[in-house]
Image (tube, rainbow, N blue to C red):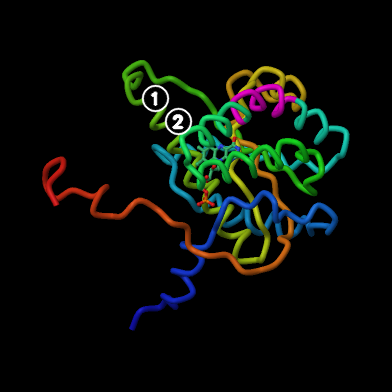
Amino acid sequence: MNEFNLAETDKLLSTTRAVRKRLDFEKKVDLKVIYDCLELAIQAPTGSNKQGWRWIVVTEQEVKKKLADIYRMGNSHYLESGKMNASDQGETQNERVFDSAIYLAENFERVPVLVVPCIEVKVPANMKSTLSSALYGSIIPAIWSFQLALRSRELGSVYTTPHLEEPIKELLEIPKDFIPVAFIPVAHTIGKKFKPAKRNPLKDVVFKNIWNNN
Ligand SMILES: Cc1cc2nc3c(=O)[nH]c(=O)nc-3n(C[C@H](O)[C@H](O)[C@H](O)COP(=O)(O)O)c2cc1C
């Protein structure tokens, strides 16, 4: 007998969405839940089992405001032009994504908790060509586990990309051999129902044995 409840597991995997407009900025988040989810996150795999991750849980308003300003400085232009391009091309789904990303950027400091996952950067001399896959591959699975664990506890989150590394490192006193990989805003959600997303069909993206063969 399968030890998992597939219906529940599949629901978790297919309804963990990028939550932005439905983040509840007013409701307090219990930090114990954040730490429980991080405990689960660090079950994720890392290259050579290095576990070079560090997680900064930011709750102080002043620090969140500074991080929000850094996020906006790096992302605002990209988000505004992304929205304009999507609108020009008639890509309504993408236009909605950019619209909601702009809303989040404008309200970034209002999220109750902002988690900053970091990863240690070490370049073994014989591994240069695979560096970025090994580096990001050693933190992004854990970030996704964190987001899944949050969702299972009725918290919402969204993976966001901070474009300006140096000011974040300086503000959070991150040592030089670590980099901040993402900003993960976390909050209770407004409403509890989330649906599976519409994706390009599997037949367009999965090939059998060789490229383009279904
Ligand atoms: C590597 C990566 C970077 C992302 N960066 C941002 C970001 O900077 N800002 C943002 O609002 N969303 C960001 N997202 C969220 C995506 O826009 C989102 O996952 C995508 O639109 C699909 O939405 P869904 O997960 O709800 O289906 C990022 C996601 C990933 C995986």
Rate crowding at label 1 as few (under 14), some (14 to 19) or many (20 or more) other CA atoms within 10 Å: some
Residue closer to the observer: 78 or 131: 78
Q: Is mark 2 within 8 Å of ligand 1?
A: no
Residue 127 in which image quadrant: top left
Q: Position of residue 92 (x, y in %)?
A: 51, 45
Q: Are marks 1 and 2 in contact (CB under 8 Å)?
A: yes
For residue 131, the mark is 1
Tell me which amino acid carries mark 1: Leu
Q: Nearer the viewer, residue 146 or 21?
A: 21
Instruction: Tell me if 51 is positioned left or right of 112 in this view.
Output: left
- Residue extent of the magenta highlight: 70-79
Q: Residues within 10 Å of mark 2 (few under 14, many from 20)?
A: some
Question: Which is more toward the observer, 113 or 19?
Answer: 19
**192, above or below 141, in the image:** below
Asked whether 49 or 140 is in front, the reply is 140
Residue 17 coordinates in the image, percent (x, y): 56, 55
Which part of the image, by quadrant, shows the N terminus? bottom left
At horizontal 61% and vertical 29% (from top left) the residue drawn is: 180
Task: Name the residue rendered at 76%, 30% in the picture.
Answer: 67
Q: CA distance from mark 1 to mark 2?
A: 6 Å
Q: Residue at x 70, y 67 (%)?
A: 191
Q: Quadrant of ligand 1?
A: top right
> Residue 57 location in percent, x, y?
73, 43
The residue under label 2 is which amino acid type? Leu
- Per the image, label 2 sits on a secondary structure element best described as helix
Q: Is residue 75 magenta?
A: yes
Which quarter of the figure has residue 95?
A: top right
Determine which residue is flagged by label 2: 135
